[in-house]
Amino acid sequence: MSIIDQSELRLASIDDPTAHQLRLLLTLAEELHFGRAARRLYLTQPALSQQIRSLEERLGVALFHRSSRRVELTAAGRAVLPAARSVVNAADELRNIARRMTAGSERLRLGVCESFTALDSTRSIIAALTELHPDLGPDVRVLDRFSDQLLALQSGEIDAAFAHFPVPDDLHCEPLAVEPRLACIASSDPLTVRSSLELTDLAEHRVISLVSPTFRAGHDFWSVNPRPDGSQVRYAAHPGSSFESVLSTVSLGGTVAFVPAVAADLYPRPDLRYLDVEDLTECTFGIAWHPGNPVPAKLAILKEVVNDYRQGRSTRADATEQAKVAADTT
């Protein structure tokens, strides 16, 4: 018996179904299993279910019978498949025509610092682009430093880049994840006996920023300048040329680097310690592009994949919160 009661379905919305929703419908119709279909589409199962329900509400009919044992197409679901396939094929052809009109720039050129290649968001988006849009690329270019990414974006060498914010004002950006920042200090530092710190505890440490002083806003953010108490930031004699060189400088002692929390997992070293700082704000990781670089077709696809990833993260967070509330009430 269908979970969706026909009496509860709204009349067809004035909003037409999107080609993206119809693509999800076709995949689910092939798999007849939400979990397998979601994995093929690089979505979470709740996110896929939400999209299918939205499509059903727009059409005003139930497309699938859902039960704890199986998923089946309804008569209406079977009836709409040929038209849905035609729409998706037409959308693909429109996209192909647009790409052919931009000969020589079909592939989406993505820049990523080596230290970001292991992040879930980076891998998920690249995998989704490769699977769902193989003719688009992507052409991934691993760059050594954040400043290299900025130069490549502004010169048009790449279309978009994975980066921690802030980014220069002339770039557009979409956030993917928010995470804490940690203080990275030498394992020989006396402060390592503490489980957490405050910024004032690090006042005597020289700071080495992850970002070059040529980009002042980024340099200040990763130096935590100005400090909440107004104290002056003392800088290391030489800026790091790469993330690894920053960590090597810190390991010698007397220096601190403020880093994304993921660095503790990606760069565990016996000569370093990563500590919580109670009054240190979080950082945002996302994708940035120059508005004049990507052609509209490539930018639209990139935004679609990014939005799917963000929706999946939001759905997972909601499910986790609901499970926590349920556990607290039992």
Image (spheres, rainbow, N blue to C red):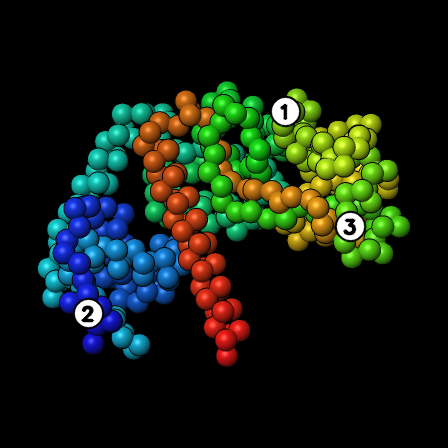
Residue 48, x across and y down, in percent: 33, 58
Residue 242, x across and y down, in percent: 69, 34
Dot 2 or dot 1, earlier in sequence: 2
Numbered circle sitting on residue 5: 2
Residue under label 1: 215
Q: Nearer the viewer, residue 290 or 322?
A: 322
Number of residues whose C-alpha sits closer than 10 Å to that of mark 2, classed few (under 14), some (14–19) or many (20 or more)? few
Number of residues whose C-alpha sits closer than 10 Å to that of mark 1, classed few (under 14), some (14–19) or many (20 or more)? some
Instruction: Please report contact status of discs 3 and 2: CB closer than 8 Å, yes or no.
Output: no
| Residue at 56% over, 23% down | 151
Residue under label 3: 197
Give the vertical position of 152 relative to 301 (above or below). above
What is the distance, in whole Å, between disc 3 and disc 1 at their CAs?
A: 28 Å
| Residue at 46% over, 26% down | 290
Q: Nearer the viewer, residue 5 or 134?
A: 5
The amino acid marked with disc number 2 is Asp
Dot 3 or dot 2, earlier in sequence: 2
Q: Nearer the viewer, residue 256 or 112?
A: 256
What is the distance, in whole Å, between disc 3 and disc 2 at their CAs?
A: 55 Å
